[in-house]
Image (cartoon, rainbow, N blue to C red):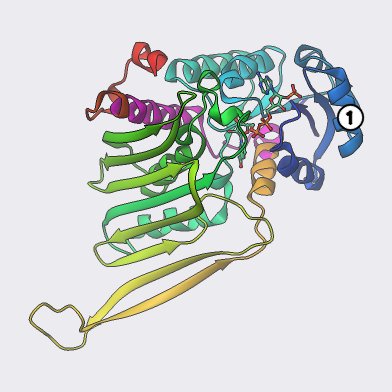
Amino acid sequence: MAAQQACWGLLSTARINERLIPAIRASERSELLAVASRSKAKAQAYAQQWDIPQTYGTYEQMLADPAINVVYLSLPNHLHAEWAIKCTEAGKHVLCEKPIALTTAEVARMAQAAEKNGVIIQEAAMMRFHPQTQYLRELVANGSIGEVRLIRGVFTFTLENPGDIRLDVNMGGGSLWDLGSYCVSFARTVLQAEPIEVSAYHVGGDTGVDLSFTAQMQFSTGTLVHFFSSFQSFAHIEADLLGAQGRVYADIPWANHIGASANVWVTRSGAIEETSTFSDSMESHTTDTKIYENINAYQSEVDSMVESVLDGGEPVISLADSWRNVATIVALHESARTGKPVCPLKLTDELTRRC
Ligand SMILES: NC(=O)c1ccc[n+]([C@@H]2O[C@H](COP(=O)([O-])OP(=O)(O)OC[C@H]3O[C@@H](n4cnc5c(N)ncnc54)[C@H](OP(=O)(O)O)[C@@H]3O)[C@@H](O)[C@H]2O)c1
C-alpha cells in the first residue's frame, strides 16, 4: 500500500537543517522521526535541541530504520552521491542538498539507483521552489520583455570560517559549487534552455578551491549570461535580465531571507512619444513591481517533495535537469582551468571526474 505519511530522517546535523526542520514540522503529511550523525553523542545533543524522537550514531543505522521513508541529505557535497545511492538501496526517497553531485557520472549512477529501487532523488535547490522563480520563467516564456539578450547575476559573501566545508577542495568546496550553482540553475530554468558554450576565470585560494569565480555562458536561445560568485566579497545578491523590449531586476533572486521581502521590477518600453535622432530619451516606460513577502521556499520544497513521494507528483527538479546543471558547472571549472571555452553537453565522464 502507498505510504500515507512522509516520515523523515535527517542525514547529518548540518547547519542547513535549521531551515528544513520547521518546514517538515509545518508540512501536513510529514513527521520528523530521526537524526543520524557520525557521533551518537552529537546526534543526541542535536535531537534534544530540536526535539527529535530518535537518534542514530551512524548513518547506516538510520537507513536500516523501516519507519523512515524520506531522508533529507545535508552532507558535504562530495558525499551526496554515495549516500543518496545508499538511501535508495534502503528503499528511502531522498531530498539531497545542492549541488546534487560533483560529476555527471555520479548523477547518472544516482538516477540508475533511484529507478532500480523505485524511489525519488530530488535536488534541494531551494530557489527552484520559490514562486518568484516560476514568475520569472513565465515572464520570459510569455515574451514580456522580448527576446532575452542578457542575464547578469551576483552571489557573494565573506567566508571567514577556516574549517568550513566550502574551503575544502576534496569536499567539493569553492564558490562556484556553493553559490554559482544557483546562478547556473537560475539561468537554465528561467530561459528553459541550455548553455552551448561557457568560458570562465577563477581566483584560487590556499586550499585549492575557487574563492571568486566569473562565468560567461552562451545559451541556445542566443542569450548571453554572466555571473560572479565569491567567498571574498561584500555580501551581495542580485540578478537582472535585459530583453529586446524591457528589463527585469530581482533584488533577492536565489536566497530566501525568511521574513524579508524579495522584489522584482519589470520595466517595459511603451509607445515612443516623439522621435529624436536616436529615439532614446523619448521612449516612455512602465515599471511593475512584484513583492514577495514572507515566502518560505524551504516550505514549498518540503511540500513539493511530500507530494511527489505520497501522490506521485512529478519532481520540480528531475535528475536529468540536475545532470545538466552539474555538466555546466564542470564545464565552467574546466574552462577556468584551461583558459578555453568548453561545451557543457559534450563533456565526457572522464573529464567530469577530473574536475
Ligand atoms: N539550500 C540551501 O539554502 C543551502 C544552504 C546552505 C548549505 N546548503 C548545502 O547543504 C549541505 C551542508 O551544508 P552546511 O553548511 O549546512 O554543512 P555543515 O554545517 O558543515 O554540516 C555538514 C554535516 O555533514 C556531516 N559530515 C559528514 N562527513 C563530514 C566531514 N568529513 N566533514 C564535515 N562534516 C561532515 C556532519 O554531520 P555529523 O557530524 O552530524 O555527521 C556535518 O554536520 C551542503 O551540500 C551545502 O551546499 C544548502
What secondary structure is marked by label 1?
helix
Residue 172 image point, x, y percent = 52, 24
Q: Say which residue appears at 23% left-offset and 30% top-offset.
A: 341
Q: Quadrant of the C terminus?
A: top left
Residue at the farthest left position: 277
Is residue 274 toward the left or the right of residue 106 in the image?
left
User: Residue 279: image x %, image y %?
Assistant: 14, 79
Q: Residue at x 45, y 30 (%)?
A: 205
Q: Is residue 23 left or right of residue 332?
A: right
In the picture, the quarter occupied by the N terminus is: top right
Q: How many marks?
A: 1
**Residue 164 spot, x, y in % from top left:** 62, 30
Q: Is residue 333 shown above or below 57?
A: below
Q: Quadrant of residue 242?
A: bottom left
Rendered view: 26 above or below 85: below
Which of 257/63 is in front?
257
What span is colored magenta in the figure? 307-335
Residue 343, given in percent of the width and then of the height, sits at 26, 28
Residue at position x 56%, y 50% in the image = 255
Picture quadrant of residue 59: top right
Question: Which of the 4 quarters of the picture holds residue 44?
Answer: top right
Apparent side of residue 158 relative to residue 329 in the rendered image (left or right):
right
Q: Tell me what residue is drawn at x 47 percent, y 17 percent.
A: 108
Name the amino acid type tagged 1.
Ala
The local crowd at label 1, few if under 14, some if 14 to 19, many if 20 or more residues have their Cα within 10 Å, is few
The residue that disc 1 covers is 45
The chief SS type of the magenta part is helix
For this orientation, the residue located farthest to the front is 206
Residue 31 makes an appearance in the image: yes
